[in-house]
Image: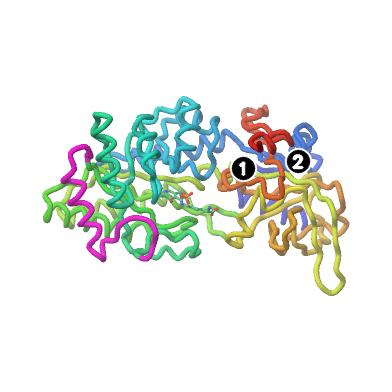
Amino acid sequence: MATILNNEILDMLCDNIARNGEGTLTLAGVNLASLAKKYGTPLYLYDEGKIREKCRAYISAANELFDGGARVMYASKAASFKRLYEIMREEGMGIDVVSVGEIYTASAAGFPLEHAYFHSNNKTDHDVEYAIKSGVGYFVVDNVEELYSIDRIAKELGIRQRVLLRITPGIDPHTYEAVATGRVDSKFGSAIETGQAMDITAVALSLESVELCGFHCHVGSQIFDAEVYIAASRVMLRFIKDVKLSLGFEASILDIGGGLGVRYVESDPYLDIRATLSEVAAAMKKHARELEINLPEIGFEPGRSIVADAGLTLYTVGTVKRIPGYKTYVSVDGSMADNPRHALYGSPYTILPVSRELPADTEICSVVGRCCESGDILAENVPVPQDIKRGELLACLTTGAYHYSMASNYNRLTRPAVVMLRDGEDYVAVKRETLEDLTRLDV
Ligand code: LLP
């Protein structure tokens, strides 16, 4: 019974996680207890093969399904460190960057920045200059102020900067509020509904040192329904047609953002990348035909669905506190500093013992961190062995996206190392922070 439950959870969440003959969890065939011993905990782990598999799934589907061509840009806010940009370069992916810090990291990894889209709703003049000088291929322009800044700085630097305009199509992606960015009431982009999208397009076309190439939208994150993209693309293609009629400009690129959902827990649906893209492609071609426009080159910006289930985090249990009549708190050596997602979004997780199967007798607990804050909860309602105690290893699954990249030094906790697994071998991609690192910038 317990074995079935375990295997079901594992197969369902990700095919790279399994149990070996001794019942110990493995990721990409590597024993997790051995990795915890070698590197200590908390520890972020990535299966390099899984990341590459996802990149290839996107690129092959995008290339085969879209007649007008397609490009896939990894949204590197999901996880940003040098090794990942090297993998993206090797896989022929583009990247989406959102800050000078991400541009710098990608550049330090030797990523060819002409294949980068630079986002952000508030690029300072310094950001604009840094990105242009770094050779960033495209700016995804959020607003008119930014357009003027790019035009002025590009002129000073003697170049013409290629841009896309970020448009808000007004689609509600049925996802959680905090990450729903495609609606009209949003800090991102220019809305079609208010006329601002057409206005900014006219401004872009009037500027000498800006080369308008097309449009961008992003409707949200952790989306499980292809219909959301189909609805957004219908609105965007209609807008492209209206722009052609009103301003005589024909967009050559339409980027429809990222957001494909992944499974954190059993109740999350499974989304097949190719099947989803295929539905979107068929609908887009149909819309374009109906509107009598050419389908532009289509861009995708997946972040989570590239790296999330390639990753997991290992923790060691510390204090186990049972409050009779209330609940049990199992504390681990990590916290909201290495995983703020439950604290921020109430996100659920699957957490499993590393060194043994989940027994038939479990106890439901809250897995909490060691920050000095009651909200420092990693997951609620987690079944753990009734005899769980200090020293037991736990694995929190599906932590490859928005964990390391959102980690902080809150409570002066040091950030965990990032270890990658490749062909049965392990190697460090990001070193564990030391206490000295914590005071490095203090004067
Ligand atoms: N493109 C744009 C313009 C975006 O804003 C985002 C995510 C993406 C692409 C990638 O979306 P993805 O494929 O990863 O869903 N910290 C939150 C997620 C915030 C997403 C923000 N934008 C979380 O941990 O769930």
Query: What secondary structure is found at the residue carrying circle 2?
Result: loop
Residue furthest to the bottom in view is 325
What residue is at 17 percent from the left and 54 percent from the top? 243
- The answer to whether mark 1 and mark 2 are in CB contact below 8 A is no
- Dot 1 or dot 2, earlier in sequence: 2
Q: Image point 45% across, 47% down: which residue? A: 273
Q: Nearer the viewer, mark 1 or mark 2?
A: 2
> Which secondary structure lies at badge 1?
strand
CA neighbours of label 2 inside 10 A, class few (<14), some (14 to 19), many (20+): many
Mark 1 crowd level (few <14, some 14–19, many ≥20, 10 Å Cα): many
Counting labels gives 2
Instruction: Tell me how far mark 1 sits from mark 2, CA to CA.
Output: 15 Å
Q: Which residues are magenta?
A: 185-211
Label ID, residue 311: 1
Nearest the camera: 205 or 429? 205
Residue 41, label in figure: 2
* Residue at left offset 11%, top offset 49%: 248
Quadrant where the N terminus sits is bottom right
Answer left or right for 265 relative to 89. Answer: right
| Residue 315 on image: x %, y % | 75, 46
Depth order, front residue of 139/260 = 139
